[in-house]
Image (spheres, helix red, strand yellow):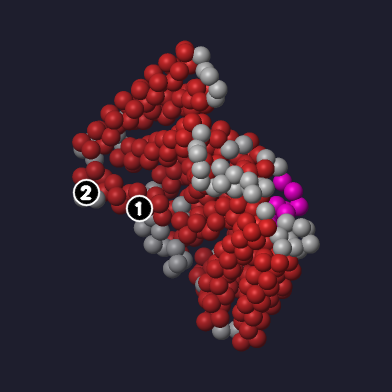
Amino acid sequence: MGQPLVGQISTLAVHQILVGTAIALLALVLLIGAHLRVATPLLIGLAAVFAVEIPIGALNASGAPPAAISTLHFGVAGIAWALLVQILLLTRTAPSEAAAAPGAVRDVLRDYFRVTKPAIMLLLLTTTLGAMLIAGAGWPPLSLILLTLLGGAFASGGASAMNCYIDRDIDVVMSRTRKRPIPTGRLTGDQVFMFALLLSALAVVVLALFVNPLAALLALAGNLFYVLIYTRWLKRSTPQNIVIGGAAGAFPPLVGWAAVTGSLNLTAVLLFAIIYYWTPPHFWSLALLKARDYQRAGVPMLPVTHGDAHTRRMILLYALQLVAITLLLVPAGYVGSIYLVAAIVLGGVFLNYAARMYVEGTSRLAWRLFKYSNYYLAALLLAMVVDRALTR
């Protein structure tokens, strides 16, 4: 049955969890300090000290390090904490407009959190976790799960924040997005740009140091594809933006799979394909409801360029391909009858919504399909996990 999901955690695992938490704390402190424009030399110093501390800490936690390494580890850590305390004190007393406003820090953090698009992040992390839980012969270590999800959260948040930066001119025009932090002026484009770079860098650091290089490389590839290929190029140039750009959202299960196995196989590719073919029906059903918004912003989404009827037909076509691909996991030999029944039932409901929307073409059905597609993906992954857990 493999190792239990929750059991004894090694010293190295505890160290990795603490370092991951420290990285998140570092990002938070750098973010607050930079936004309040205080203690810039200290912020730079803290970032530099922490960059030195990571490899030293890794050496210290592996095996029996020399006494000099342990001493250096604690010394550098002490410097980092001293800088951290000093920065926190300065941010509490700095005479800045942001600091003077009641609840300013809380509001700033809320806005930075918003540009990470937490709903999308949650969905992507769900696919990462699902892939991790079915990839190995047993349950992966809890520390590996937490660190992979932390790195995945940084990657997703960084990509989404960069999307907000690049699309800031579009977001001002669209009613769905005009209340985001950049269009409203609560954050500047430069602030969000630097935040996006910070999160993306943290994602690579966490995954490369504490998971494995392949997981880090896949996360970086997914981010670059989403930012450069989809957001920067395809979104504004072709109605096939979602079809091609959907590949970016299919990288998280590959990251999860690679985190556990250190490699990719046919099942991982099928998981990628499931997300890839799920993406067009999901986003096109929303685009049907927001077609005027996209038209006003000059974004060539399929309903804008080819009309509602063609879009509904394409949704049905991709839904059929999606359901067919979900069933391929069974002959691939990685899941069994429990998953098969769930995939047939869930896919049947998906196809029913898509077929009814194709025939009736109502906004109500478009919205119901959009909402159901979220539940569908989560339920499908849950069925995979349950099937694997009962048949291992």
Closer to the camera, 35 or 374? 374
List x then y, in percent, for residue 215: 62, 41
Which residue type carries mark 1? Arg
List x then y, in percent, for residue 107: 30, 52
Give the overall secondary structure of the magenta segment: helix
Does residue 79 sit above or below 116 in this rendering? above
Could you say which disc has been placed on residue 101 in the image? 2
Q: What residue appears at the point 59 percent right and 55 percent down from the top-left corner?
A: 130
Q: Earlier in the sequence, mark 1 or mark 2?
A: 2
Q: Where does the magenta region start and end?
A: 264-273
Query: Could one spot residue 263 in this view of the protein?
Result: yes
Work out how far the residue at label 1 is from the one at label 2, CA to CA, in angstroms: 15 Å
Which residue carries the number 1 mark?
A: 110
Horizontally, is 96 left or right of 20 in the view? left
Q: What residue appears at the point 42 percent right and 24 percent down from the top-left corner?
A: 49
List x then y, in percent, for residue 138: 63, 47
Could you say which disc has been placed on residue 27 in the image? none
